[in-house]
């Protein structure tokens, strides 16, 4: 009888910036012969259908496992199954609490599996899943969604009591013990925030740290040549195996694959964007997008639009407008339609989900105004695209430092602190139209410095692609991860 395949159970946080890279990771692992159970909930399964289709078309053993999401038990409105579906700020805490309720259905699923799971790979933000692995005696790995630079900085800051002792959120502090080659940087509690550094979440933060300590290894969506000094130091500091296996988006080579990420209707969006980009001059287009969670309010939206209108270059702008539940979206929509008419032929406005991987990899696209979410950053690196950085929250400020100061492939738009209070009465404009225009000009042109940034970006893009090929560092690290999982499972005496 054939030996059953290695069965890996992959558990992403229910947020696009986590589901997308962990779905890519699942495809990569399935392509090496592992059987994958990708754990999700019914509404999120719809978004992951594209990935399941890619797997099915390629004959890869990937299965979506839908656990019922207990919205009502957690006091959440029906359908509140993803971070980008949380309608009010006060529901963030119940949402993250409700994730723990997935533990029992997960255990039931794992116990009922005839061949048994080999190991669990859980998102850092799903520490309860590591508890499940411990309860069942399974090997467990943590997937860290941020950059290694962010992880190392925040680990060092934590070890120097920064989070516990700094009382002033704006007080500058130099990140301690960074390796040579990285430089010296100052942060504040606002710009070095970890995922759960917000009021009332210290219990979750401690749970995350405990789960990390209990993990058998850490998986990262980066590659050794991008942040070599950080990977080495982080490996040492974490005291366990650390495998950078990215950029995981590198799994997708064609339009269908790139379009499958994050939406079941991606193919339709991707075909439209590809058509618009067809025939555009190489390296002429600017792409503007702030990821899956950050929304833009009306006044800020107008400033971005006017900045883009003033710069005179072709652009694609993915707009996710913030509309308060009690507000009407018509004013914003009217303005956007008028803006589209004014910039017709030169600009493409995408409302909602944009086929980002496809856009970034198109030869016509040269620059990216980004919020520095780590997936967006590493996707831009892979595509060899230079960035104008506009961090909004969490790890994004440290990712900006990495892009601008360490790697030299971006320019700052000029934002100094996070934009919270999305639904507050006060609409704050952080970046005026002139700042937008000037950042875009600097990143798309920028004289000799601009040429040097583009040269470095192209070089890193090449290294990113090489890392994923046979014999590349990420390719090899993925093999090591699989070998380690197999060895641990055998030691723990699980059916293989
Ligand atoms: N993304 C996309 N289309 C969009 C918005 C986001 O394809 O309109 C993808 C993007 O390519 C990336 C992920 O969603 O893979 C966003 O992750 P990131 O870490 O950049 O930011 P977050 O959404 O977590 O803030």
Image (cartoon, helix red, strand yellow):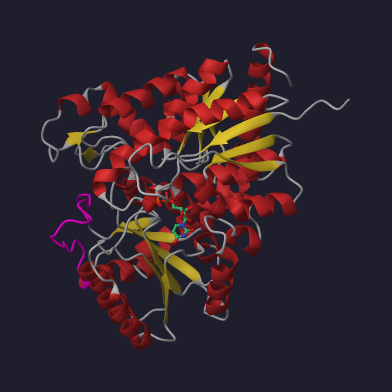
Q: Position of residue 253 (x, y in %)?
A: 65, 57
Vertical order, 208 against 431 (above or below)? above
Span shown in magenta: 415-433
**Nearer to us in this view, 264 or 60:** 264
Residue at the front extreme, as displayed: 72
Q: Is 395 placed above or below 254 here?
A: above
Q: In terms of secondary structure, what is the magenta stretch mainly?
A: loop
Residue 251, horizontal then vertical, whole percent: 63, 50
| In magenta stretch: residue 469 | no
Figure quarter occupied by ligand 1: bottom left
In percent of the image, x 74 and y 21: which residue is there? 496
The residue lying toward the viewer, choosing from 478 and 492, is 492
* In-image side of 466 versus 460 (left or right): right
Residue 316, picture quadrant: bottom left
Q: Is 424 covered by the magenta stretch?
A: yes
Report the residue at 29% width, 47% height from top: 397
Q: Is residue 88 visible?
A: yes
Marker count (numbered): 0
Residue at the (27%, 64%) spot, across then down: 323
Residue occupying image coordinates x 39% and y 49%: 80
User: Is any atom of residue 118 visible in this view?
Assistant: no
- Left or right of 266? Residue 342 is left
Return the x and y of residue 477 as percentages of the image width and height: 61, 33
**Residue 5 found in image quarter:** top right
Q: Nearer the viewer, residue 160 or 471?
A: 160
Q: Is residue 237 left or right of residue 297?
A: right
Picture coordinates of residue 163, whole percent (x, y): 22, 28
Q: Residue furthest right?
A: 1
Q: Quadrant of the N terminus?
A: top right
């Amino acid at each position: 009888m054939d030996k059953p395949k290695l069965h890996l159970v992959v558990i992403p946080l229910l947020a696009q910036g986590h589901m997308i890279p962990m779905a890519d990771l699942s495809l990569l692992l399935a392509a090496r012969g592992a059987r994958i159970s990708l754990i999700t909930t019914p509404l999120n399964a719809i978004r992951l259908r594209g990935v399941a289709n890619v797997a099915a078309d390629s004959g890869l053993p990937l299965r979506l496992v839908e656990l019922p999401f207990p919205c009502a038990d957690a006091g959440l409105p029906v359908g509140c199954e993803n971070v980008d579906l949380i309608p009010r700020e006060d529901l963030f805490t119940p949402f993250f609490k409700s994730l723990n309720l997935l533990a029992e259905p997960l255990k039931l699923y794992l116990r009922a599996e005839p061949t048994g799971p080999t190991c669990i790979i859980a998102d850092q933000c799903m520490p309860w899943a590591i508890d499940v692995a411990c309860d069942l005696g399974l090997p467990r790995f943590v997937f860290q969604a941020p950059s290694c630079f962010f992880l190392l900085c925040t680990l060092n800051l934590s070890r120097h009591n920064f989070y516990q002792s700094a009382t002033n959120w704006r007080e500058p502090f130099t990140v301690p013990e960074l390796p040579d080659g990285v430089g010296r940087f100052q942060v504040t509690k606002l710009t070095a925030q970890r995922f759960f550094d917000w009021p009332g979440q210290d219990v979750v933060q401690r749970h995350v740290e405990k789960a990390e300590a209990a993990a058998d290894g850490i998986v990262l969506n980066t590659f050794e040549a991008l942040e070599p000094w950080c990977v080495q130091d982080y490996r040492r500091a974490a005291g366990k195996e650390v495998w950078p296996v990215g950029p995981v988006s590198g799994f997708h080579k064609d339009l269908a694959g790139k379009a499958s990420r994050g939406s079941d209707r991606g193919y339709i969006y991707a075909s439209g964007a590809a058509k618009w980009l067809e025939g555009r001059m190489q390296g002429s287009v600017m792409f503007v997008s702030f990821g899956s969670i950050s929304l833009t309010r009306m006044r800020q939206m107008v400033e971005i639009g006017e900045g883009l209108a003033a710069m005179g270059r072709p652009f694609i702008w993915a707009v996710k407008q913030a509309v308060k539940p009690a507000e009407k979206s018509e004013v914003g929509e009217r303005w956007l339609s008028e803006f589209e008419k004014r910039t017709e032929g030169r600009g493409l406005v995408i409302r909602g989900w944009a086929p980002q991987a496809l856009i970034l990899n198109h030869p016509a696209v040269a620059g990216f105004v980004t919020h520095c979410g780590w997936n967006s950053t590493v996707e831009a690196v892979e595509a060899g695209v230079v960035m104008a950085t506009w961090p909004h929250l969490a790890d994004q400020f440290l990712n900006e430092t990495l892009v601008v100061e360490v790697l030299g492939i971006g320019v700052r738009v000029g934002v100094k602190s996070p934009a919270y209070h999305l639904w507050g009465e006060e609409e704050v404009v952080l970046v005026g139209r002139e700042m937008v225009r000037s950042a875009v000009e600097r990143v798309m042109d920028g004289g000799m410095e601009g040429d040097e940034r583009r040269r470095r970006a192209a070089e890193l893009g090449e290294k990113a692609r090489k890392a994923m090929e046979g014999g590349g560092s990420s390719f090899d690290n993925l093999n090591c991860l699989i070998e380690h999982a197999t060895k641990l499972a055998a030691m723990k005496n699980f059916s293989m």
